[in-house]
Every structure is written in structure tokens, then in C-alpha cells.
Image: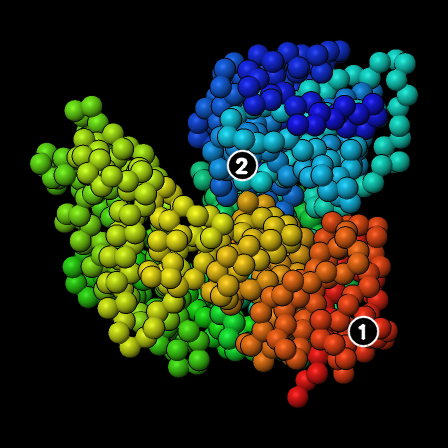
Amino acid sequence: MKILTLIVGCLLICSCRFHAVAQQASANWQRLTTGEELAHGKKVLFFPKPNYGLTNDKNDPYDLTDGTLSTRPDSRLWLDKNAVGWFGSGISSVNGILLVMDLGSEQPVGQIAIRVLGGKEQAMLKLPSAIEFLASADGKQYYSLQKLTQSDPDSKSTFDAENSYSIPETGKAFVAAFACRQAVQARYIAIRVMPRDNLFTDQISVLKATSSTPLQQLESFPKTSTYPDEIFFDGLAITPRHLPFTVTTNITTPNWLSVQDNSGLDLFHNKAQFKIELPHGLGILPQSQPAFEKTGADTYLFNYDGTTGHGSIGPLWIQPEKDVAIPVNAQIVLTSILNGKDSHRLSYPIHFVKIPEVSPIKGLDISLAWLHDKTEQGWPNFLRDFRKMGFGYVSTFPRAFGKDATGFASNNGMYNTSAQKSLDFLRQAREQGYGIVYDESPFHIMWYDIQSDQRAGKIDDAEAQEIYNQVDGKRGKYMNILYRGKYFQNEIQRVASLAALVQPDQVYLDIELWRASVRESKKDPRVVAAWKKSGKTWEDFATDIGTDVLGTLVKAMREAVPARKLTVGLYDADPQHAIFTDFFEWKKIYPEIIDIAQPSLYVQGNVLTVADRIRFDYDAMQRRQIIPWLSTGTHGEYDPKLTEPIVLETILNGARGLTYFQFTDFDPMDFYYHSKAIEDLAPYEKLLQSGKPIEYKGDNPALHYTCFANTAEALILVGNYSDSPQTIVNLPLPIHSATKVLLEGKPLAVKNDAVSIEVPPGEFRLIYVGNPQ
């Protein structure tokens, strides 16, 4: 492991090697923060607010400046009330997680430092992908003093010793300290953390510069380019989730708003509202959320109860009025209101964009699967416009279909009006040429029913003994993996009956239940006896049972849809993830039970990770039976323009399509760049049907190469994803004596069966080579 100690700029101290103890981390921190502490006792503001229950309490704003480190010897900050934590939707922010403090007056700041959890003791408990240190004199304009990015030290083209860090995370929790030593005069200090999954921290330090330390001018550092430049220390501020605020002109796409709440009020019991003023010619459609009233020709008033869905307010459906000219300098004005009084009134320019319109490409299964029935029905002109972005499937969650007046799917009776509306919608979708994706989380529903009936006293001791593991003569917490009783049979029937109801073309299963059951079942005498009788290793025995469980489920679903050949996938199951939740082994379930690999690629815009994972799976399978789960924001937002190369790398490395999680992560520009990628591929439909990925390299090792070809044509994708300054590359033609070599539709000069192009940092180029008929 490399320890980076930088004389100027940022200092990274790794507080724990694999066998180090928490006391060493504490000693490192004490050495690092020796000096006059400016942060002690200061209040820290959080954007978004911490949300992890085991660390969350009223002391969170002061936990990071009280000088008290976690005393846990195992470094598990997520179990310490003195720490502050974010989990799940709490990190779904364009700007990561921002921690801000006011020092009270301008001070000579010599060092800023923070302690964060790492180690990957659990899959989501990893070090952040980046940490940025910011400072401001007035609390409005911030300057970026230093940004550290996690990187690979073995990659010479990307590893910057002053701005990168690399610490192995091998399954043992540790706390790492990151510090910036750019000395400046500042009053407001901010740290922006970009988590890879979750964030836990227990202390921040701001040291006063010594009298002999030369101070640098704040203005000599770059202004923060990522919104927000302003941090609001009081009241309520409703702001766009993304800037520039974008309205799509030809296809209506969702906008979302963010919240900065430092009012100190319970907004559920205090009257909170916000007002949106739009230029004449734009309108907010009635299916927008939350509910609103139109109070003027172009003014809309929303009530706000203090809650957000997935960290944002929305969706807002904003649509231009036909034949009305909108000023080029149009702005949206957002006014937050507390108890009848304006809190903050903010204006932002509106960016108008036309989404590239493209039909679904034959042979590519493109969907936004985590898009619920009611959202599809509320999306303006959904069935007309969704296909214009290359989507060929609509999704459905029939487990949410209600029966009778109570609206609960588990009740007896006919499906209620809402469910009938969803079924009619699916019928219309199929009539208009869409395929249907059925999303299901089998066995989770069964487990909920078991727990509910247990609490209600509907399960007697004999049945409970059959269902639950028996550990040391007592009832365990989890289900016995050998259980095949009433609840198991009911679950198989539930899923099969819903498949029969919606008649899907594809089924995407999300089964993340079993790991705890598998591990506890290893202690159950009944399971141990069956294991020993099998003569197999525990892993082989457990995955045999998982294969039987999954096979029983999928067989019932296929029998329920005899007229269609279902395409079935299991979330996060693929050749690289050989065993999933200790229960499903890839080589046992593919291709006998499931049809496609579905790697989970929620990677914050890391194009290379997507390309490498898809190619690994294709090389292992030698078949284009891959439909990954991608995301435009889960586990952290990224620049929407990266969606375009992500889609291209997915398809050209061997996937037969893609799907997304989830709708609430999509902003207008995400849809724009998704559609742009489909548009890039559309002219090559025949090649995409008949070709396959092949090995290919150009002469510049700093660039990434993907080639998809048949015997007569090829697409070469060259990416400078690592921002290399080495931008020129010579590309040998994979199709010799090709009659056409095109870059963005324009011919390239060919010399000695090769072409030369430039790929600027952060960009990619897609080249067509071939002898088309």
C-alpha cells in the first residue's frame, strides 16, 4: 500500500493497514491535527442531511467538531452515535455530500482534515471516490483548494501523486484521514465528499495557519464549477437538482428540485411552500408532484411537507406551449416560503434542448425497467414519445396491483380500478409495439408475509419451527433454506399468477434475501444433516439448494406464459459475480434456468468499469446474452455526458441491450445523452445484429479500444476516459481495403490500411469501417 505525504497541497494519511488497530488511527489523527483548532465546537451544516439511523441524532451538527473520535476498536463508525452517516438515497446528490462550517470571522487557515470510513467490511462500506476541500470569504462564492480522487497507482497515465489516493480495501473496516494544506484566509470551510456507496465520518479539523505560513489568495484557486456556488445558512431554499436548468422541447422529460433546509422548523407542522415562476410560453403540467395550484398566468404554488422522494422533489413536467416564442434569456424563479414569508428567492437561466429522436434498434433490448406503472401512466405522451428515445419496452410491477376496495394485492377479490387501468395501459403498450418487462422481487414478499403473520399470531410454534432456523435449540432470525411449506408454495403461485396476468416478454428478478438465511442455516441441525449426507462442500450444497429454489420459481413462471418465450434475468448474476448472496451460482443457473447475465453497474459514470465488466462477461459466455443494470445516479450522480459512452461501451462490448435503475435518477440531459448514444448506433442496425466484439488495439496505450465487427464491417470506439494528454492515435483497419471509413459521417483519410485521429481528454470517437453492400 502506498502512503502519500505531500508537502504542499493535500496530505493523505492512511490510518489503518490491514492489521492496524483503531488506536493507531487515533494517534495518526492527533499528530495530523496538532496546532490551534479553529473548528472546535463549530456547527456543521450538511447537504443533504445525514439519514443513517444508528448514527443519526440531534448532536450530528456538533459531533464532527467536538474533538472526540470513535472509540470502537473495530473502527465500525456506522455503529457509533458519535459519527455521522449517510445511507442509500441520502447520497443521491449531484454534488455528493457537502459539509460546511462558518468559522465566525475570516481566519488564516493552514489545514483542513476529515476522517472517513473505508475498508469494504461490507460491500457498500467503501472509501469515497473523491474528496474536495473548499473555502469562501463570504459564504457565497467558494473556491476549490484541492480535490483528491481515488485512482489506480499502477496506471501511469491517470495516477497523480498530488491529487490521487489509493488504499487497498480488503474487507476490514478502517478509518482514513484526508487533509488539505493550502493556506488561505477564509471564513467558510466546506468539504465535498463523493461517496461510492455510503459515507461515515467522525471528525473534521481546521487548523489555524502559523504566523510564518505564507497565505495564498482565494482568488488564485478555481471557482467551484459544480452547483451550488451558494450555501444557505438560514431558512429554506428550493433549488434545481441540476444546472443548467434544462427543458426539453420535443419530448417532455422530468425535472427535479433539491432542498437546503436550515430553518430549524418541523416543516410537516409548519407551513412550508415554494413558488415557481416561469417565462410565458412554458407551463407545468398537472401530473407534476407535489400538488400545486396556478396562482397567476405563469406562477405555480406548491405545498411542501419537508419530505423528499429519493432525495429530491418531483417530478416536474414542464412543457413549452405550441407556437409561443420564449425569450432566449428565459429564467426560472424559485421562491421558498415559510409560514407565509419568503425565505429565499433564486433565479436560474433555462437551457432548452431538443432530444435526438431515434426509433428502437432491432435486436437491442433497451428499457428503463425501474419505472413504475403509475409513473408511466402519468408521463405526458409516454407511449408516443418513449420509443423516440430508443426504448422498446415498458416495465410493470404487478405485485403492487390492488384488489378490491382496500387496494392490497394480498386481499381476495377482483383487481381494483387502479390495477385495471394498469392492465389497460400494458395492453395499449403491446398494441403499439412495445415489449413488457415484469420486475419482481420473489421471496422478499414471502418473507414480509411470514413476519407479518408472525406478529399477528397466525403462525403456531410447529409451523414456526418448520419455517425458521433452529440454532442452539432456539429459534433463529431467518428462514431455513430447506423450507418448502405453505408460504413458499404461495410465493411460487403468486409470482406465476402475476406472470399469467401481464404476459411479459422479459422478467427481471431481484432476489437479495438469502445471504443471512444461508449463513444461519449452516448452524441448523436439520440442514447440517442434509449437508453431511450430500458429501459436498458447504458452498456446493447451498448453491444446489439455491438452484432448486430458482428453478422452481422460473419453471412456474414459464408455464404461466406458454405463448411466449420468456427472457429471464437475475439482478447482479453474471460470470464475474460467480456466486450471488451465497445461494445462486452462475454456472448452475445459466443457461438452464436464466437466459441472460445482468451485472449491476451503478458506477458513478466510470466508463471503463462498465466496458471491462461487459467484456469479461461476453468473453466468459461467448454469447451476447447480457442486459446489464445501468444507472444515471444511483450511488452518486455524474456528468450526464458520460451516459453516451457508457451506452456505447455496453453494446459494443457484447451486451444485447441494457436497462436502467431508476427513473428518479434521470434528469433531462441524462435522457438526451442516452438518446444520443442510440442515435450513434442506429445507422448500423444490421452490423449490430450480425457482429460481435473482437480484440483490437491502436498504438496509443493511454486510450481505451473497443471493436465490434462482422466479416465486412466494424465499429471502433476509442475513448480517452483517463484524460490522458497523449491524444493522437493510429488505428489499423480491422476490415482490410475498406471502401468506407467514417468519423461522425465524414470520410477519414486512409494510409497503409490505417487512419490517424485525435481523441481529446475525456472524449471518445466512434469510427465506422467497412465494405457495405
Question: Taking 218 as reference, is 327 left or right?
Answer: left
Task: Give the residue type that dot 1 points to.
Answer: Asp
Q: Amino acid at mark 2?
A: Asn
Residue 504 lies in quadrant: bottom left
Mark 1, residues whose alpha carbon is within 10 Å: few (<14), some, or many (≥20)? Answer: some
x, y percentage for residue 206?
72, 20
Residue where numbered disc 1 is placed: 753
Q: Viewer-nearest of labels 1 and 2?
A: 1
Residue on which disc 2 sits: 198
722 horizontally vs 631: left or right: right
- Nearer the N terminus, badge 1 or badge 2? 2
Disc 1 and disc 2 in contact, CB within 8 angstroms: no
Residue in view at x 45 percent, y 51 percent? 572
- Separation of residues labelled 1 and 2 (CA atoms): 49 Å
Locate the C terminus by quadrant. bottom right
| Along the viewing direction, whichever of 499 and 168 lies nearer the viewer | 168
Residue 553, percent across and down?
Answer: 26, 57
User: Is residue 715 in sight in this rendering?
Assistant: yes
Q: Is residue 652 above or below residue 32?
A: below
Q: Residue at x 64, y 11 (%)?
A: 27
Placement of the N terminus among the 4 image quadrants:
top right
117 sits to left or right of 345: left
Please provide percent x and percent y for residue 9.
Answer: 81, 28
Helix, strand, or loop for circle 1?
loop
* Residue 282 image point, x, y percent: 63, 68
